[in-house]
Image (cartoon, rainbow, N blue to C red):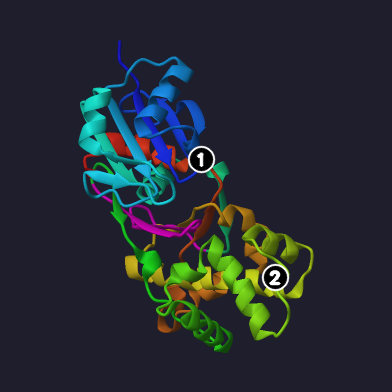
């Protein structure tokens, strides 16, 4: 009897696990465990396997929200740290892959149902062309998907740390504000949860009004309720996301489409169609028509990272 493989998508707060049959991406026994409840990765895996009544797997692919290129992996937003070799030995794994969480998001995209994609604006995807996956959350993830003869090849990047380039007078004012606070200003400084809050605080300072909100969720809620400063900050966030996604699409040649993932964009679906997102995405001078033809979608599927980890397990392009 074939033993199911273990897959996981592990962030700073929660560890999401599932089982798949080797060669399949059909998720079984999905569970979410709070990281703080367990001393480390092995303990969380053992608890999950006991919880779902599964036998010890022989293969596993886990995605982590932190750098994973060396044997020693240290989580950025919790206390977990481990050696890949030691975990594989302790769990008896003959095949153990560890990938970046946004690489998993990218690899999951080809397996998303159309019902979990919300199209923003016009454009038509070209088959077998590169795809861009970008999304603000705790940080700003940027990844590519390149088609090959047998598999999709994930292109892992640190594109979120590219330099922020203002496109109008207000953004030049914002750049001055952020430069005074941080020095060099990356795209991620603005396009993440903390960045949304910082954009609100910056707008309050530029408009000489008292800031009233202290979290990204409060800013979004205030924008929905009609607060002028919160609304302006949120719409600017979306406009900058459009401009940066457009730049990345140009760089990659993403004629296969652009997919907006992460924890923030699904919550902004009501705002995106009436924002400047698509205008900023396509506003690229002589290449404006090129970008205007590239479609953009918001991904609403809840388990994209798990699907990507399942894809990576036997994808020869993922080592």
Residue nearer the viewer, 195 or 122: 195
- Quarter-of-image position of residue 7: top left
The N terminus, quarter of image: top left
- Image position of 212 (left or right of 173): right
| Tags 2 and 1 touching, CB below 8 Å | no
Specify the farthest residue to the top: 1
- Residue 202 falls within the magenta-colored stretch: no
- Residue placed at 32% from the left, 17% from the top? 3
Mark number, residue 113: 1
Residue nearer the viewer, 2 or 233: 233
Q: Position of residue 187 (x, y in %)?
A: 44, 71
Q: Position of residue 82 (x, y in %)?
A: 29, 39
Task: Provide the residue span drawn in magenta.
Answer: 123-148
Residue 56 position (above or below residue 132): above
Residue 115 position (above or below residue 239): above
Mark 1 crowdedness (10 Å alpha carbons): few <14, some 14-19, many ≥20:
few
- Image position of 237 (left or right of 87): right
Specify the farthest residue to the bottom: 169
- Residue 137 falls within the magenta-colored stretch: yes
Q: Secondary structure at mark 2?
A: helix
- Image position of 200 (left or right of 185): right
- Residue placed at 70% from the left, 70% from the top? 230
Gap in angstroms between the C-alphas marked 2 and 1: 34 Å
Sequence-wise, the earlier of marks 2 and 1 is 1
Q: Which residue is denoted by mark 2 in the rendering?
A: 230
Mark 2 crowdedness (10 Å alpha carbons): few <14, some 14-19, many ≥20:
many
- The answer to whether residue 183 is visible is yes
Specify the farthest residue to the right: 225
- Residue placed at 50% from the left, 63% from the top? 123
Tell me how many marks there are.
Answer: 2
- Quarter-of-image position of residue 199: bottom right
């Amino acid at each position: 009897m074939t033993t199911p493989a273990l897959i996981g998508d592990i962030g700073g707060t929660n560890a999401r696990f599932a089982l798949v049959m080797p060669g399949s991406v059909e998720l079984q026994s999905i569970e979410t465990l709070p990281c703080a409840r367990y001393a480390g990765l092995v303990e969380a895996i053992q608890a999950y396997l006991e919880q779902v009544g599964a036998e010890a797997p022989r293969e596993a692919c886990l995605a982590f929200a932190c750098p994973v290129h060396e044997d020693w992996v240290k989580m950025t937003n919790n206390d977990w740290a481990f050696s890949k070799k030691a975990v594989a030995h302790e769990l008896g794994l003959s095949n153990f892959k560890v990938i970046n969480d946004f690489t998993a998001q990218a690899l999951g995209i080809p397996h998303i149902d159309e019902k979990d994609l919300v199209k923003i604006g016009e454009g038509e995807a070209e088959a077998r062309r590169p795809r861009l996956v970008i999304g603000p959350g705790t940080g700003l993830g940027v990844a590519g998907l390149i088609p090959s003869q047998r598999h999709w090849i994930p292109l892992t990047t640190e594109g979120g740390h590219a330099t922020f380039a203002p496109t109008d007078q207000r953004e030049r004012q914002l750049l001055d504000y952020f430069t005074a606070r941080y020095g060099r200003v990356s795209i991620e400084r603005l396009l993440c949860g903390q960045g949304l809050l910082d954009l609100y605080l910056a707008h309050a300072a530029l408009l000489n009004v008292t800031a009233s909100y202290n979290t990204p969720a409060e800013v979004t809620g205030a924008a929905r309720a009609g607060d002028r400063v919160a609304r302006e900050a949120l719409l600017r966030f979306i406009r900058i996301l459009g401009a940066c996604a457009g730049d990345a699409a140009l760089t990659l040649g993403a004629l296969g489409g652009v997919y907006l993932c992460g924890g923030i964009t699904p919550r902004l679906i009501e705002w995106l169609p009436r924002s400047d997102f698509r205008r900023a995405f396509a506003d690229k001078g002589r290449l404006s028509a090129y970008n205007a033809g590239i479609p953009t979608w918001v991904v609403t599927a809840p388990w994209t990272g798990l699907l990507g980890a399942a894809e990576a397990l036997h994808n020869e392009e993922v080592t």
